[in-house]
Amino acid sequence: MEADIRAVLPNIDPVISEYSAGYLTHASTAWAGDEEASGPSPLDDAASTITELLFSASGSYGAATHDKVRSLVEKWVDKYAAASNREENRGPAVRRLDQTIQVSTQRNMSSTLAVATGAVDLESANVRKVESRVDKKKLEKAERKIAAKQNKKTFKTVEYEASRLINQPESAESYEEFYMAVNPLQLGGQSGKSKDIKIDNIDVSIGGNRILTDTTLTLSYGHRYGLVGNNGVGKSTLLRALSRREVPIPTHISILHVEQEITGDDTPAIQAVLDADVWRKVLLKEQAEINQKLADIEAQRVSMADTSTDAAKLDKDREAQDQRLGDIQSKLAEMESDKAESRAASILAGLGFSPERQQFATKTFSGGWRMRLALARALFCEPDLLLLDEPSNMLDVPSITFLSNYLQGYPSTVLVVSHDRAFLNEIATDIMHQHSQRLDYYRSSNFDAFYATKEERKKTAKREYETQMAQRAHLQAFIDKFRYNAAKSSEAQSRIKKLERMPVLEAPEAEYTVHFKFPDVEKMSPPIVQMSGVTFGYTPANILLKNVDLDVQLDSRIGIVGPNGAGKTTILKLLIGKLQSTTGIISQNPRLRVGYFAQHHVDALDLNASAVSFMAKMYPGRTDEEYRRQLGAFGITGTTGLQKMELLSGGQKSRVAFACLALTNPHILVLDEPSNHLDIEAMDALAEALREFQGGVLMVSHDVTMLQTVCTSLWVCDNGTVEKFPGDRAAYTEYNVHMSMDQCGLALQSVMQTISGEHGLDGSGVYNGTSELQLERMNVYFNEASGNKYVPRAVLVDLEPGTMDAVRAGPFGQLFRPDNFVFGQSGAGNNWAKGHYTEGAELVDQVLDVVRREAEGCDCLQGFQITHSLGGGTGAGMGTLLISKIREEFPDRMMATFSVVPSPKVSDTVVEPYNATLSIHQLVENSDETFCIDNEALYDICMRTLKLSNPSYGDLNYLVSAVMSGVTVSLRFPGQLNSDLRKLAVNMVPFPRLHFFMVGFAPLTARGAHSFRAVSVPELTQQMFDPKNMMAASDFRNGRYLTCSAIFRGKVSMKEVEDQMRNVQNKNSSYFVEWIPNNVQTALCSIPPRGLKMSSTFVGNSTAIQELFKRIGEQFTAMFRRKAFLHWYTGEGMDEMEFTEAESNMNDLVSEYQQYQEAGVDEEEEEYEEEAPLEEE
């Protein structure tokens, strides 16, 4: 038969032809004479299976091919059937009873016995015939329907592992129909329904393979679940089943599963995102139609008498239309339809689409950018259950960071499949582990916590199983020995009962281990491969890369990072010779062999062939055993290598590609996104293999773990250049934008002077440092310019030019970019309303343009730091306006403000209570972290501690710069316990409104002076918690710490710091709220400040801050009662009601601090106990 198959299908895989012939032969012999009369025989079943297998393996899906295959199989079925009949005629054989026999008489019984020997005809055994009552025509029709369904199911293609499980609709109409069918519109009555999901006893299968059996799906609303598991376990299939509601999820819970990419057409990108919310589009269309109907009704109604029948009908119709319109408008308001365009633009911007690109037609984008569009559409729709399958694939580092930040603020439930450890650590609140046809849940765990817990569970289960097996063996040995011993029989019976009562434990799962191994590399003299002055463009007018210099040696471990479209893959293709440079030289050692792993490696695989036959075709000269051994070195074991590759998961295809790559015995490996689709174990194995590889490695990757564990140097590809990055991967992701308002521009100058000095920069930004650590994370706050010069990423703003002139004239005036000075000509005159509504409102767009430019220059923007005063008109009024605008445009970025509250001792502003109260009213809503710096406290430090008789703004700003330098040191230098702005907020802010911090610094020194006395950790701790060192005029002894952070710098012992923090907490427990167990966060950095051997910066979230707010509030109320100075504010268009709202908000803030200061651990429990009897009654 195999020869006939090859004759009909000459291109078929030999493995498939051999298997098919053997399968049919086995069916004809093993099942002979055992077929059932009520259905097709097993031989017919086997024939059907082999027909479809051969047809799918033929590579041709025409009717002619199908007929040839079917005729071939039928021919051999007939041969096997004829042979079977000849066997039956040769003598007695076991016969099957295919008609009923009446055994009511002895004669019938004898006949039945005769049947057993095969010596009688069954027809003669029956006294009566039983007529069939089955309608043969209906039966045949039903069988044809079943066969058609089976064929449809057989030929339905399922993309198993990548994110293309929901086949892309062929048209916008089909997408809309699918969306509306899966997510029916809920116009009302759904507000009280729970959106938690808990479904018991679910089974999920694919292609006859069970992936989940009798398991429970539990998704708590608002949680973000990371779904992890080995390649091929069925994670994507589970998402597909959820997205199509094959798992019975309640219909009031909306679901959306991200497609791999959208179909390109002439629709602009932003419109494609807006159209993704189908119900919004439908409702807007219906709203327009109803408005037109109402207009028509009104036009007809004008000419009718109120008492006419037609008028009554129109009135009734109008009432119904009004009712429907009201429902639609309520739903649109719930969807925030009016903000849709700005929200869509913000999401697209976060994923790398510039305002210009947002207007491009979708057909102009590449596959990677269309995938981003698909992701943007899903984020825009905000379903109750968002399903993401490997969303970080094809995204660059900034886009992954945006997605991570966006998902952390996502209000609904997220279920994401990802193999990116860092991404899961950032976004996951829970981990769901899919294995062994079940789901295990790890609550309140990111990936690292899950992995540690899983390993511990595995060890415990293995230990318990082995212990029980030993106990069972011991009991069974006793039973076997003494079961029939009369003297010991009772003891044996006791042990039998004990054995029966023991619970049956499941055997531990077989260890899933993957080992990658690349071949040894023969030594080669340098240079290996070099690029010198290379310029490349796909067209002469469109130059992508300019003057690229890159040198790869056998010991190189180079990672290339940068935004999508910058030319990272192009560099790899130039290096291996797939592209030719426009100008420049690319030289290679003539004996060099390069192993190239393409981002779209699947395109190079023959998916209709098995991995073994593909390798034999591409790399001939080895035996099948050698190919299978090679595949086994990359985790393709057993019969997996003999399956058609279209049946393999994405991760398994990647492993096949690596196995093929290793067969070339490369000297260097050039890898383009090698971690895509690999599971965690495979990624670890790949990283280990790359570290042990004796040749060079050059990779493009977005995976944080892969870059950190493999690469020793990073090169950034952006703006047509490729340059070595001075820091590590962590530094590459942490960027901030500084902004300064009004007189605090002088404070920012002082801050930048301090930070520049710590990084070895002089007043013009030229690097004169001596340590690599100074350069390692320079890019967090500085942009590198030409001539070894660095420019701070800072914007300086004022409504009058005087302050800007003072900064320019200062010692560090040449440090800043000239076009980052933004100022007006008239000033705000200490009037908050003038800065917020009139003069400031005219200038704010100009400021935002500069902010956007600086933000776009950040590869991974973490947030904004704003230094401003709360007492004046510009810093308070325009400052809070700018904060609110930035918050609106960058909602997922951190907003940290260093807010200076003025004091009469160093200020002549009478209306500062108005300005400060109105500003705090804004900061409560729009800031994430507000570091309160009180001029009165700064003045006291200068006078009493530093003994300065006449402190100036320069002296005060020096203290501010010391604190700001200390707070940001973890961003700028590597440390043992680093804490960036986001981590600081997560650990310091227990409630969203209570984010106002007191700050301090130790040891305190005056400007221009240095501390020559050595200090110890205990001394720093004592000074740090001393009320005299606090830079806000609030005594912490009058409140309680909710949380606090201690940031140490210099050569400090971690254990000593922890001991001191523990002592402080134990000895001063009355100053810490008892309902937060671990109030103190610590951070360490080995780099000391200039002029000091060690220092500490203190940040405290204390309820004592309410003293500052009370003082301001009392002064505000005293003036506001008499409407004093109010006309200056209302004259700028400000509503008096804003004063009332600001006063109320300030009072509420004070009350909240007081409430949590007095709260105890058992308070809520006692209240519950008091209310319980009432609930029972």
Image: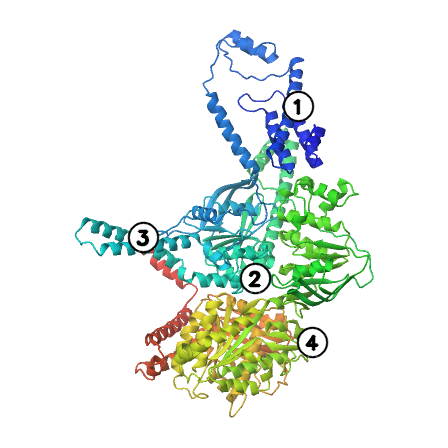
Callout 1, which amino acid?
Answer: Thr
Among the two numbered marks 4 and 1 on one chain, the one whose residue lies closer to the N terminus: 1
- Secondary element at tag 4: loop
Q: Which residue is mark 3?
A: 324
Q: Which residue is mark 4?
A: 771
Among the two numbered marks 1 and 3 on one chain, the one whose residue lies closer to the N terminus: 1
Among the two numbered marks 4 and 3 on one chain, the one whose residue lies closer to the N terminus: 3
Q: Disc 4 and disc 3: Cα gap in Å?
A: 70 Å
Callout 3, which amino acid?
Answer: Arg
Q: Disc 4 and disc 1: Cα gap in Å?
A: 80 Å
Callout 2, which amino acid?
Answer: Ser
Callout 4, which amino acid?
Answer: Ser
Q: Which residue is mark 1?
A: 29
Q: Is residue 101 toward the left or the right of residue 698 in the image?
A: left
Is 364 above or below relative to 1063? above
Query: Dot 2: few (<14), some (14–19), or many (≥20) neighbours within 10 Å?
Result: many
Among the two numbered marks 2 and 4 on one chain, the one whose residue lies closer to the N terminus: 2
Q: Disc 2 and disc 1: Cα gap in Å?
A: 61 Å
Residue 111 coordinates in the image, percent (x, y) = 55, 9
Residue 270 coordinates in the image, percent (x, y) = 49, 59
